[in-house]
Every structure is written in C-alpha cells, then in structure tokens.
Image (tube, grey):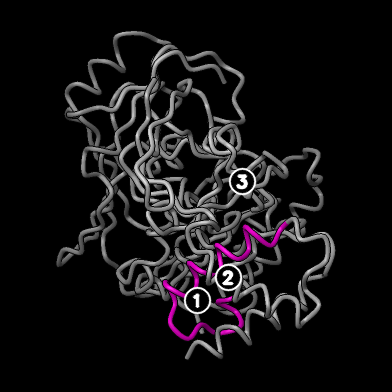
Amino acid sequence: MKVQFTLNGRNRIFEVSPDEYLLETLRNNHITSVRNGCDESTCGVCTVLFDSKPVLSCTMLTARVDGHHITTVEGVQNEVEHISHYFGDEGADQCGFCNVGLALTLHALKSEIKDPTDEEIKTYIVGNLCRCSGYQAQFRAIKRFLGDQK
Amino acid sequence: MEIKTYHKATSLKEAYQLLNASTKNILIGGGAWLKMSTQSVETVIDLNALNLNQIIDHDDYIEVGSMVTLHDFESHESIISLGKGFLGTAVGSIMGVGFRNIATVGGSIVGRYSFSDLITSLVTLPVKLIFYPFKEMPLESFLLSKEKVTDILTHIIIEKRSGTGYFKKVSNSGLDFAILNVAVFKEQGQYQIAIGSRPGGALIAHEALDFLNSQPLVNDEVIEQTANIVLDTIKLGSNKAASEEYRKALAKAYVKRGIKEVSS
C-alpha cells in the first residue's frame, strides 16, 4: 500500500506493507538516525515526532502516519546540535545511542511544558533509557539547556 | 502480527459493517499492543479519521472520545481536576510519553487489560461506555462481561465528582507492568476501592465498601477491618511478577494508606 506523509518538511510517498512499522520504513529508506533498540515499545531510542509529539516509531504502524507530519533529528538539526553541546559539557555523551531519541523528546518537552519542574522533566523523559550514564549527567544537561532557553 | 489490509474508516457505519464482516477483522486504537500479538488479521480498521479524539467538558460530565491518546487524557485540565489528579497519576505511570502518545483510552478499555492502570483508577468513578450503534453500559459491567466486543466504543462518559482520589501502582521498575494497582476515591463520606493487576483484572471491593460506607466513624480499627475484608473477598494470585502472599501484603498496606489519604 502507498503511504504519503511529510517527512522533515518534505512530502514523501512510501510503498509499505500494512503491517510495517514506521521504524522499519524510515530505516529502509536511509533515515538511519532513527535507532532500533529494544523493538518492544520500551527503550525510546526510536523516538520520532508525530505531528510534533514524541512517539515510538517501533510501535506505530506506517499506515497510521498517512497524511501526517513526521520529524526526525534531521528536521530539527540546529536545535539538536545545540542540545548536544549541553550533553557533551556535562559528560552525558557516552556511546550516544540514546541521544537522538532523548533530544527529540526534549524538543517536545520544551514545546509542551513551559518552565517544567524537576519532577515534570523526569516524568517526561522516563521512557528514554540510557545504559551508560545513570541519568544524572543528562538531567543536569537538560536543566541547563532549558534554563538557558528562558 | 500479520495484517493483510489496512483500512481507514470514513464513517462509524462503515467501520461497524467491516468489523462484523469477518472474525479476522479488528479495530485498531493506537495499535500499541498489536505488536505483541502473533495473530493473523485480515483487515485492520483505523478510526482515526472519525473525530473521536476529543475531550469535551460538559456541566455534569466529561466526554472522552475513544481515540484520545493516554497522554492527551492525562494532560487535559478536566481530567487533572477530577479527584485531585489521581487519573493523571495513574495514566502518567504507563510506560514513557512516546508510548502514551500512541496508546488510546478506548483501546486500553476495550482490551480489558488486567494490568491496566487506567482501568483500575477509572472504575472507582461513575463511568459509562457508549458503543456504536446503540449500546451503553457502565464500565464495571463491561469489565465483568466476557463477551467479545462486536460494537464500537466511541465515547467514555465520566460523571464529574468533587471528591478526592488515590492511586498506587507497585511495579519492579518504572516502565514495568504493575504487580498491584490500588485506587481509592472518596466523596461525601462514601468510598470506592478498586484493586487491579491482581494479576487478574480490576475489581471493585464491594463487600469491603458495604462495611466501610456504613460506619459512622472511619478510624484505624475500621480501616484495618476494611483492608482485611478486601483480602478476604478480592482474589489475589501469583504469577512470575509476584506471589499471592506478596500481593496480599501490598494490598493491605496500600488500601489502608489510600483510605487514610483520601480521608485526610
């Protein structure tokens, strides 16, 4: 079946099977910034923005995306590069596998919650797992990033 | 899961006819749990174009479209204001935000998932389910019914209440299923208690409530007796997540804590 959606501002048409997930469609079409982690709706590394909201691309059927907007890090490149400086400064950048999904979730958090509390930040990013850092460095980086956006 | 055809419904009538045309046709809510299924499906019917993703605040009730996502539900002011936010607490504890932006309220209810944090909290309130083409039924009756769902859940009607709610999910980690869910709601001296992830589905503790709601004074002794009746009348069992004994210890502690919290 044909599925048409806006990917990072460009109208795209993909030929997919009805049971294909968005993660597979994107990676099969060379959007490899979207990572395949657990593939069980848990780890958050496959996060993309669906109409500006973070979703797990491993859990969303591509057919469901028809007519909507999908954004990967390529679509918000400047901001993601900006965020990555904060991660680097705080030592939150280790293997880097989770950074892409976390950056997109952070982008959505910034849009959705103005001046979030520490608890709101933690609740929002709880679905983006990191196996290197123990989260303290990321949390400091996120706090500084959001603080500097005010 | 193998899906042969994906169909975007253009009307409820069309969706209903297609759903009932074959036992291998299914409705999709957010589709979050489809991934875990190994069944083969002829046609998946998508309701996203049918304007069922709205939450409307009426004078006496809140009308929730079945396709409202869990994250939109937990973030909505009308839902946050109910029971001092206990519904939001319950739904906000389900996986991460990326998952809750996919999973829907309707899909969670129709699935009658035994581990559902949403169902355990919601069933303590007066909630009615509206199905296309005709049927209406209380949430509790739906949960107790074993019938296959052949109608389409379109709306969830939550009566507004001014009371206080409590929700506790016990799990081994933040993203795990609940070992036990406990919800308590109190309004004008009347309590509701529901226990979920027993590991069976959520049940209202009717016998315990008959006792508790007839007491002129709710003190520590009454609360202790209420918790004991919950353990005597609500079946708690064992699975690989936790033993029956452990669930009983948890249930006793959190039922008591919940009653105290909504009473304070």
x and y, in percent, of residue B221 in the image: 64, 74
Tell whether position B240 is magenta.
no
- Residue placed most toward the observer, A77 or B262: A77
Q: CA distance from mark 2 to mark 1?
A: 6 Å
**In the rendered image, which quarter contains the N terminus of chain A?**
top left
Query: Which sits in the foreground, A17 or B179?
Result: A17
Q: Position of residue B152 (x, y in %)?
A: 28, 30
Please report whichever mark, 3 or 2, sits nearer to the chain's N-terminal start: 3
Q: Could you say which disc has been placed on residue B234 in the image?
A: 3
* Mark 3 or mark 1, whichever is nearer to me: 1
The residue sitting at 53% across, 33% down in the picture is A25
What amino acid type is highlighted by mark number 1?
Val
Q: Amino acid at mark 3?
A: Ile
Residue A70 is situated, as x and y percent measured from the top left of the image, at 43, 49
Q: Is disc 3 placed on a helix, strand or loop?
A: loop
Vertical placement of residue B42 versus B172, above or below: above
Marks 3/1: CA–CA distance:
21 Å
Mark identifier at residue B58: none
Q: Residue B67 appears in which quarter of the rendering?
A: top left
Q: Tag 2: residue type?
A: Gly
Residue stretch rendered in magenta on the structure: A98-121
* Disc 1 element: helix
Q: Which residue is labeled 1 in the image?
A: B262
Say which residue appears at 48% left-offset and 51% top-offset: B206
Asked whether A114 falls inside the magenta stretch, the response is yes
Q: Is residue B64 left or right of residue B228?
A: left
Quick check: B197 above or below A22? below
Of residues B113 and B205, the one drawn nearer to the viewer in this rendering: B113
CB-based contact (under 8 Å), mark 2 and mark 1? yes
